[in-house]
Image (cartoon, helix red, strand yellow):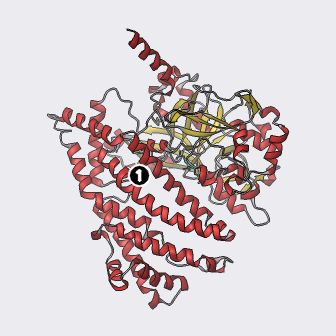
Amino acid sequence: MKRTLLTLLAALVLLPALADEGMWLPSLISERIDDMRAKGFRLTAEDIYSINKASMKDAVVLFNGGCTGELISPEGLLLTNHHCGYDAIQKHSTVEHDYLTNGFWAMSRAEELPNEKLWVRFLVRMEEVTDRIAAGETAAQIVEKAKAEGTGYKASVEQMYYGNQQFLFVYEQFDDVRLVAAPPSSIGKFGGDTDNWIWPRHTGDFSMFRVYASKDNRPAAYSPQNVPYRPKKHFSISTKGVKEGDFTMIYGFPGNTQEYILSDAVAYIAERSDPAKIAIRTGRLDIITKAQESDPALRIHYAAKHASIANAWKKWQGEALGIDRRGTVAAKFDYETQFGLWSVGRPEYAGVVMGLRAEYDRIMDAYFAYEITRETLSTLPAAYTPEERAEECFARRKSAEQALWRHAFREYGRCPKVYRTPSYAEGMARYKSPEAYADALFEAVWEGSDSVTMQPAVRLREETKRMLDHISWMLGTKSLRNLNSKILNELYTTYIKGLREWDRERAFYPDANLTLRVAYGSVAGYEYADGEYHKPQTTLDGIIAKDNPEIYDYDIPQSLRDLYASKNYGRWGTVIDGRRTVPVCFLATNHTTGGNSGSPVLNARGELVGINFDRTWLSTMSDIAFDPDICRNIAVDIRYVLFVIDRVGGAGYLLDEMKIRR
Ligand code: ARG
Ligand code: ASP
């Protein structure tokens, strides 16, 4: 009796952190709304998504095809991450006006900077079209019809549950999006690659843009005559802050998850693919880091390359570790076996799990070869361009570049033999070692030699491309982002259908595919290690503790040091654990992935309390299996964003157009 009571109590206490898995389709959110309200949400399904009235979806945008942004004023002001605005900020930066280093603050509308090829997309509506397609209409016809509905309309039909359902998404795209503000990188990218995917975190990862439209509020190409867009809806901001257990919701565009893949695929990822790719990238990063440390010009030259190699490299480590620690492969295998037993005597499903396993057996090596090739030979340049050659630091790159070629040639040896290009085998026979072979080809490309000397490098390159094509032909699909094949896709269509029939308790949601989703959960810390609990909130005090002028990633602007010294926090100061400070980042249990960067983090009343930008290290396993004990998303606290705009940027005037509630 006592034991049951205790278990019950424990369950109650743990409740807020439980079962926050899922990325839900907004148009079907009414199916989740009771659960959301039970967890604290105060609004309705219609407030989240409606085609009859302005709703939250009208304040969320797909930001340039890889991130999310949100509208925070009636005049088109938009928030996203610093790392999402990075390209735009970098393009406007010069030695005289280095906005990456020093930040950028438009002091009037006239100072807002236009950006070529930067766009945002609002969801006009979404609807299921499975029946229309079954009745004979093609996806292309449906898309064409939808696009004709309005100026700047885009549309696509997306598959859910491996094609069991199809949904039409209609978007309105705006192409005049101007840069309004960005903090210095020492705030916006504070902690750099060292703190990336890590908690405790202190990054002010935000930037601001403004959407412009024609005078009649429609999408229009850039023009000085354009005016700020008047969105149907924008988010109010709450400066009340969050505390552990508070409801949170994330509305955004998650890119890619694989929650239903077989244990075979999970084992492949965690035991074969991730470790190989990590090892290869470790070597590349070592070479690049060494070059960067030897020469300040090279540090800058390789910065973006280093960051992009390191981001996935670190993610894969967390993912593989998480999967291993949580026993994901074994748990999935059990689940599949139980399904297999249920499916006996059900002709539609019997054999589907075995079929999947057999297909994985067929394609595993080919896909591994594809991945290894992409991580090695495909990373080498076809040529060093005249622009590069003109750069002051070009000659000093030679030894690093040569080392990268040698490394790629060596690591390509991991590729199963039958999928290696013939010229590689010939080259190895002739030069006896990958290093000597690499040197010969590198020399020709580095010198920019004549076509005869270049021939072996050109041939290797072309054969490599053709080998990748050959693999995608074998797999029957061009979409090789995941371990995938045409046959797998068909089998998964059946498998998911069967799972949904069999596992009535499970709350199914379609894998992320860069369509708009709602995730909900609560602010929560987690047990990082045995006896080591990580609190869900960080503060300015933590930034000061990390501050170190000697270390590039931790060298904060003097203005922040001064603000800390004077405690001149104004309305942004608040008492946390008995100390007056400024809140910086917080953790929550929302299920997110790449593409959710920049997403609004909303409280129970639908007010903006943060901007999502990352996950903790082991959390990255949530792309494959969401574990409520450890999976946490990381957001920058909106109060830190406002503090930085106001106190560091001196651009407090921007706050006037926002609706800030205390
Ligand atoms: N890990 C985050 C994401 O996947 C942030 C990446 C940008 N930050 C960085 N230090 N590289 O996008
Ligand atoms: N940092 C990721 C992004 O840019 C978010 C994540 O993977 O959690 O979308």
State left or right for residue 595 relative to residue 273: right
Image quarter hosting the N terminus: top left
For this orientation, the residue located farthest to the top is: 1
Q: How many marks?
A: 1
Question: Residue at the spot x=55%, y=39% of the render?
Answer: 633
In the displayed structure, 112 sits above or below 493; it is below
Quarter-wise, where is residue 307 in the image? bottom right
Query: Callout 1: helix, strand or loop?
Result: helix
Is residue 301 something one can see in this rendering?
Answer: no
Q: Position of residue 158 (x, y in %)?
A: 42, 46
In the displayed structure, 359 sits above or below 455; it is above
State left or right for residue 200 relative to residue 254: right
State left or right for residue 250 relative to residue 9: right
State left or right for residue 255 relative to residue 373: right
Q: Position of residue 174 (x, y in %)?
A: 62, 50
User: Could you tell me the amino acid type at mark 1?
Assistant: Ala
Quarter-wise, where is residue 368 in the image? bottom left
Q: Position of residue 343 (x, y in %)?
A: 19, 35
Question: Residue at the spot x=33%, y=54% of the render?
Answer: 484
Image quarter hosting the C terminus: top right
Q: Position of residue 549 (x, y in %)?
A: 74, 55
Task: Name the foreground residue: 150 vs 556.
Answer: 556
The residue that disc 1 covers is 140
Is residue 491 something one can see in this rendering?
Answer: yes
In the displayed structure, 71 sits above or below 274; it is above
Task: Name the foreground residue: 435 vs 646.
Answer: 435
* Structural crowding at the residue carrying mark 1, measured as other residues with C-alpha within 10 Å and reported as few (<14), some (14–19) or many (≥20): few
